[in-house]
Image (tube, helix red, strand yellow):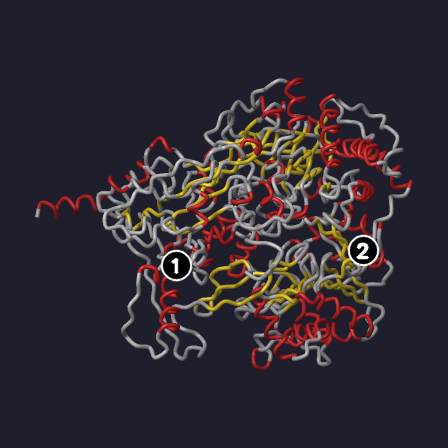
Amino acid sequence: MQWLGTGGLVAGLLPACRRVDRYLVPYNQGPEWTVPGLPTVFATCMPGIRSAVPLMAVCRDGRPTKLEPSPSWPLASGLSSWAQASLFGLYDPARSRKILFHGKPAARQEVQGAFASWAKKTVGKGKCAFLVGDKISPVERALLEELRKRNPGIRVFHWEPLSDAGRRMAVETALQPGVVAVPRLNRVRRLLALDCDWMGTDPQGVASEFMQGRIPDDERSRTIPGSGKDFNRFYAVEGRFSLSGGMADHRLSLLPSAIPLFLWELARRIGSLTENACLRDLPAASAPVSGEWNTWLDACAEDLCSHSSQSLVLLGWNYPQPLHSLVLEINSALKAPGVTLSFLQGEKTFGESLGLLPEAVRQGEVETLFLLGESNPVRKLPPEWDFRGLLESPNLESVHLGLYVDETAQACDWHFPAAHYLESWGIERDEFGRFCYMQPVTLPLYGGYSRIEFLSGLMNSKGRLLSADNAPGNLSPAFHRVRKCFERAVNPVNKEAGWTDALRRGFSPETVYAPLMKNPSPPSQETLDACLCLAETPPPAEGQREVQFVPDYAVWDGRFLTNAWLRELPDPVTGLCWDGSVQIAPDAVEARTMEGKCHLLRVEEDRRCFGEGVACLVPGMPDNLLVIPLGYGGSSVADAGSHAEGNTWTLASSPAAIPYVRRVSASSLRLLPAEKRSIALLPPVSEGDIPVPVCEMDSLSSASPAPESPLWMPPHANDIHQWGMCIDLSLCTGCNACLSACQAENNIPTVGREEVARDRIMHWIRIDRYFRRTEGGNVSLQAFPVACQQCAKAPCESVCPVNATVHTTEGINAMTYARCWGTRYCAANCPYKARRFNFFDYARFSDEATRLQRNPNVTIRSRGVMEKCTYCVQRIEEAKIRHKAQLMSRALPGRSAELELTDKDLLLPEGAVRTACQAACPMEAISFGNLLDKSRIAMLRQSPRHFTGLSEMGTLPRTSYLARTVNSNPELVRKQNSKNGKRDLK
């Protein structure tokens, strides 16, 4: 009785732990191919901004619950955070659901009459136009071409706010229209990136292929042909701090306006070393070149030229065409074409430039405009365009098809809700030209229409808009269009079998672009003169600041503003989430006045706010540079409560010598104090000496293997499986793909801006960020993922009063949620701070958005419960069940109830279990497996680079790490140290 009384008292003091009520409704008549408890997996693809991303959609009971990388796609492994979080976009409650006419729901008869009139115009002699993105699918291209054959007056315009048009135009000018350049990074030994975030927001080639060449041969997850002991070396020259720059062996910090001068001087040096006729006679620029530049230029040029046909130079997407033409000639001098840089004959750009649209409307050549896409031109075009006024013109009827009612939708006469790609049939191309197939895994949740359905409706003789919701047999007309396009391009012998195989695989290798065996022509004198003019751009004057606008790692250009999964991901550089940032150097004038407090930094001109965000100090940036990620502020879509005010696109999209780079007066910058608890900012980055080791490549060859880590076995331990994980810090960029995958797999809720500000974020994985100044003065960024370390001698287990956190026989530190009282003793005793506590019923708060997405194999945690990483134990158990079922089917076709199995039979083969974070990692940095087997992870634990976090604590964690490797240029390091000495990180 005394115990019961004490227990009742304690229970009264604990947070309310009432479980969320859920009612399971079984099928009345289930589909014949489904088995309760087993997922159905469909191959589909995500239409990326520049190329398609094949993936697998995992569905349970008809609901897509997880996206996995396609195992058969040859280009890349893993899945980016944007692709992982696109699943949230399917269920997003902020999606458009109704057809609107002048902002109000339209009647059904009104819609039918309007659509029928548009169909008559498009197939007749109506003056119609379409606005699409830079990349359109083969099916949409075929439909638009067919419409133009029926009505030659139809015009098609293309536009993308963050376009790499300069790069594409340079390649087409040097070769022929439609040619695309694809880096072959598996053949690159020396790489120079000039303000190019090729691992992050400006993907170039398959980044994991290059990164595998930065670790010893016996530790690679794939073979790199011809690498031997010549490890890759990566140089980065940039102003802002990017994911790619943080992984560089050598990084030089320059203003964006100084990149053309650096490129010009590099071209002159490479021309003299390679005797290139176009480059060797380039005149010197009038702008002065500093001593540090000369050291860098000489060492970099010599290293690139000494690895001829194994070197590559990349330039950022936003630089003008003449500079890209110069980079192409540099790569030709380095003998990159055909080896490290492939040219493929792709498709010509479809349509006209958007700049011709306003004049066409004024001249009466366009009376009906269809806007198909998510580019949102009303918000992102320069103010002088007055695109809203153009759409609201009485002489123009505008029709918008989109996922959200954004600024463009509000300015249009009509708005139609768009279907998500997981609800649509379609075909997209990857960067090599392969057809990648979209197939719907669910009927439209909110009654949307795909672009193919919309265009097919305009071609319908009756002018009817059909989708899977109202088409006969729920078969969308897009299905027939997609299959027709497939048969025309692939032409299989057996059409039915070929179509089925293509859908099962997810792509068609037969449609890959043909290689172009041709050397690019050198740039013209006019192009070289334009490069020299850009190189001689004067530096910012006293009192001026250079502002660089870059895509955001979460919301890109603003199109993912409503995606809570992405909004709550910490920025890989600043650690900020839910808000826009303004990144400045610690030595900037504005930083000195902050006095260590949280401030907002506002950019104003003529009393108008052009951008505002949380001031974030980022080491390794020039003092007079401001970096503002695009997408925040000034949006009518799901940005309520954000601290970012003003429309950054107003300043970013204005004309400039280098697109998305502007100069402003220092007097236009204002620091505003902000309440710390109102800013969703994670702890600041660590600086100076950090507890993460770094290995030089030269020292690894003579290093001895790491001492064998003791594998402590709990009482009654399983002698078949003991699980462990190893993370290679040479490959981890901190891209957040693992966080998104873990969130989708384990039903982790989002908590919102205010709760994150109170340090109540629920992610099971935390990525710590460390800036380090290395030898030679380089500043590098080290990402350090931290989840539950699955300690063999876990300090959390001994302090739990209800035995809710226990050790399993397979070495996993498990959580029994039904026992947890929420005392938080375990979190207080965890030295890694890897546990998360439900202060509120976060799962119920996010119920509307994620109720249908949740994984039924993972418990939904309620208020008062502690949670953490469990090594995806549900996947381990699923693998065991599959393995035993295979043993039964092979050994006993007669389904006998008796079967004798040995321990060897029950041993899961390597690769049978892949955790969510491991499968999603684009760089293949995470290894997971059985420590008792001769598996890859057991081999990695013998590496000289192997270490465990906080080993002095004696917790014997099962999660361990491989130290980052650096392949420094010894000549460059020697010259930099002799000139600058070793400096402390600022």
Note whether residue 564 is visible. yes
Q: How many other residues sit within 10 Å of disc 1, few (<14), some (14-19) or many (≥20)?
A: many
Residue 969 lies in quadrant: top right
Kindly state the secondary structure of the residue where label 2 is placed.
loop
Alpha carbon of mark 1 to alpha carbon of mark 2: how far? 47 Å
Whether label 1 touches label 2, CB < 8 Å: no
504 sits to left or right of 177: left
The answer to which image quadrant residue 671 occupies is top right
Q: Which residue is mark 2?
A: 517
Report the amino acid beneath label 2.
Answer: Met
Q: Nearer the viewer, residue 178 or 269?
A: 269
Q: Amino acid at mark 1?
A: Leu
Establish if 616 lies above or below 123.
above
Q: Which residue is mark 1?
A: 908
Number of other residues with Cα within 10 Å of mark 2, as a class: few under 14, some 14 to 19, many 20 or more: few
Q: Position of residue 527 (x, y in %)?
A: 87, 41
Query: 146 left or right of 954?
Result: right
Q: Quadrant of the C terminus?
A: top right
Q: From this viewpoint, is residue 457 visible?
A: no
